[in-house]
Image (cartoon, rainbow, N blue to C red):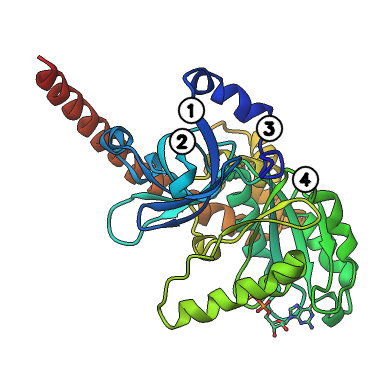
Amino acid sequence: MNIQKLGWNQFFEEAFEEYKQQGFAVGRVTLEHKKIYRVASEHGEMLAEVSGKLRFNAIERQDYPAVGDWVVITPRPEEQKATIHAILPRKSKFSRKAAGATMDEQIVATNVDTIFLVNALNADFNIRRIERYVLTAWESGANPVIILNKVDLCENVEEKIQEVDSVAFGVPIHAVSAEQNIGMDQLDPYIYEGQTIALLGSSGVGKSTLTNTLLGDFKQEVQTVREGDDRGRHTTTHRELVVLEDGGILIDTPGMRELQLWDADEGFSQSFSDIEILADNCRFRDCSHKSEPGCAVQTAISEGTLDKSRYASYVKLQRELAFLERKENRQARLAEKAKSKQMSSSQKKNK
Ligand code: GDP
Ligand code: ZN
């Protein structure tokens, strides 16, 4: 397997240099299952486990490999096995809150170049949801592309595109029908050798249909795996990262399908730049945009240039982010504590 086809590039090459000099190899994680990883590399595909050292130094879930990661390995091709020693820096990552009360960050996919935000142009069309997805995408570090699927069911496509455009500045928007193969060639420019793609969108919008089109001949394999999963069996042929026949790499993990809003500070400003620009024109610097005189936000709402519900979702998301941030800071302090504790105990051992 040529690793360029798997998405290898200059960014990772530079990060790998020091390991290369020490004689290590490199591979990309295509599946994670209970801390056993499937890794694709120049030496073929292998099952891998993390080294004792990596495990010892790992504090949070994100210190472990995830699907899409480039990992530093020592391969044992004759056994089709490998040991993972390190994770190369991630260009982008999608994560979500892990189940439960703690705020463990669970990474569902990494090193995604382009994220297709899939929405349907029928009754499910929801501009607020699109707004949220764009936010998640910006925060991840991947480039968002909005796909409005089921164009065959929509009579006012141009209107919808304009509506989406008003909440997604500078994000490309494509109206297609995955099922009826309308406008699908608009997606070609995003899918080529070395480019990693993932799909995000609510259930029923057409992700599977779209995925199957992209997969082409791989389709059969994926379907068999799904059937296996339903009966609770684990099949080893299952990959969540697939190199497409005509170039491009597709990541499709279960976690990707149930992504939640994580910390999205940076993406937040980008997504709501219209409101932040307005807010710059408020008379008071610390304007709360409620009842202050000279509030540009309230003026825009009353004049109808700013949609009231868009402002409401801005406020709501801001509140959620503040909540996440407080929790996350606490989590970071705990992790820091754990790390220093671990370090002092290993120093003692070394004495
Ligand atoms: P997913 O839950 O996002 O994976 O959605 P699916 O791919 O399973 O599609 C949900 C339903 O929408 C299925 O019945 C598909 O046949 C249908 N569907 C998908 N794409 C289109 C489309 O372009 N036009 C129409 N009319 N239906 C579609
Ligand atoms: Zn104001």
Q: Nearer the viewer, mark 4 or mark 2?
A: 2
Q: Residue furthest front?
A: 78
Proximity of marks 3 and 4: CB atoms separated by less than 8 Å: no
Is residue 273 positioned above or below 45 on the image? above
Residue 195 position within the rendered picture, expressed as x and y whole percent measured from the top left: 72, 45
Q: Is residue 273 left or right of residue 338?
A: right
Q: CA distance from mark 3 to mark 2?
A: 17 Å
Q: Secondary structure at mark 1?
A: loop
Whether residue 87 is visible to the viewer of this picture, yes or no, is yes
Q: Is mark 3 within 8 Å of ligand 1?
A: no
Please rate how many residues cluster around mark 3, counting C-alpha atoms within 10 Å: few if below 14, some from 14 to 19, many from 20.
few
| Residue identified by numbered label 4 | 193
Q: Classify residue 239 by image quadrant.
A: bottom right
Query: Sequence order check: which comes first, mark 1 or mark 4?
Result: 1
Query: Sequence order check: which comes first, mark 1 or mark 3?
Result: 3
Find residue 76 and name its label: none
| Residue identified by numbered label 2 | 73
- x 83%, y 57%: residue: 187
Residue 161 position within the rendered picture, expressed as x and y whole percent measured from the top left: 83, 63
- x 63%, y 46%: residue: 112
Q: Is residue 103 left or right of residue 77?
A: left
Q: Quadrant of the C terminus?
A: top left
Proximity of marks 3 and 2: CB atoms separated by less than 8 Å: no
Q: Nearer the viewer, mark 1 or mark 4?
A: 1
Relative to the observer, which residue lies in front, 196 or 40?
40
Please rate how many residues cluster around mark 4, counting C-alpha atoms within 10 Å: few if below 14, some from 14 to 19, many from 20.
some
Q: Classify residue 253 by image quadrant.
A: bottom right
Q: Is residue 334 left or right of residue 252?
A: left
Please name the amino acid that badge 1 sits on. Answer: Phe
Q: Quadrant of the N terminus?
A: top right
